[in-house]
Amino acid sequence: MGIEKDMGSYWSDVTEFLDAFSVELEDRALNVSSDFWRDHIKRNRTLQLKDRGLMGCRVRIKGENRSVYAEWYRTMWIRTNNGPKPLAKYITKGRTDPYGYSLKKLGRLSKQNEWQRVLEAETAFRIIREQNQCLALIRKYLKQIERAEQKWVEEICSEFDDLPDNFS
């Protein structure tokens, strides 16, 4: 029976690595978002209302595997009877890049004074999204190989265990 006895420890080692890397991606995304907002608020304090940046980003963590989702939105101000009210509209991702937003679209929606910071943050978010997708695929294939290994142990190894001792 060789390696199949030790496979459980391999799976747990890989799973621990994936979980640790998920936490790392979460930290990276939250740091990028925090840096963006810190700079955004600092810059907007020095500008008149009409010149202030309107772009915003949000990082969400979903599911038991703690998948990271970084999203962009644009804030608009609408007039109400109680005065101006902010309204955020989320921006859809581009269709050509599965991991990133269209830089052309983000550039069109961003004010000139915030564009460089949006570009820097989106570049980092794109890499994080790609890494997040890779983790999801690794988890998917890990489950698949675990199922295949279980079949091996149950269907193949059990047949050899039933052979007589003098069988060569």
Image: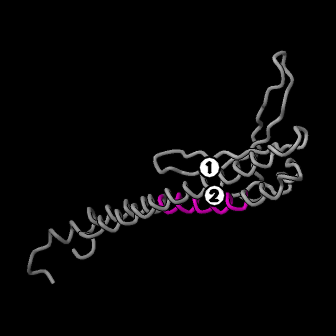
| Residue 40 as seen in the image, left or right of residue 136 | right
Q: Residue at x 85, y 43 (%)?
A: 52
Magenta highlight on residue 85: no
Q: From the image, which quarter does the C terminus lie in?
A: bottom left
Q: Is residue 24 above or below residue 106?
A: below
Quadrant of the frame with the N terminus? bottom left
Camera-side residue of 135 and 124 = 124
| Highlighted range, magenta | 122-139
Q: What's the magenta bit mostly, secondary-structure-wise?
A: helix
45, 4: nearer the viewer: 45
Please tell me whether residue 127 belongs to the stretch shown in magenta: yes
Question: What residue did someone put label 2 on?
Answer: 129
Q: In the structure shown, which secondary structural element does the residue marked by tag 2 occupy? A: helix
Image position of 125 (left or right of 155): right
Classify mark 2: residues with Cα within 10 Å, few (<14), some (14-19) or many (20+).
Answer: many
Tag 1 residue? 69
Left or right? Give the position of 31 relative to 119: left
Q: Quadrant of residue 49?
A: top right
Residue 144's spot in the image, x, y percent?
43, 60
Type of residue at label 2?
Arg
In the image, residue 48 above or below residue 80: below
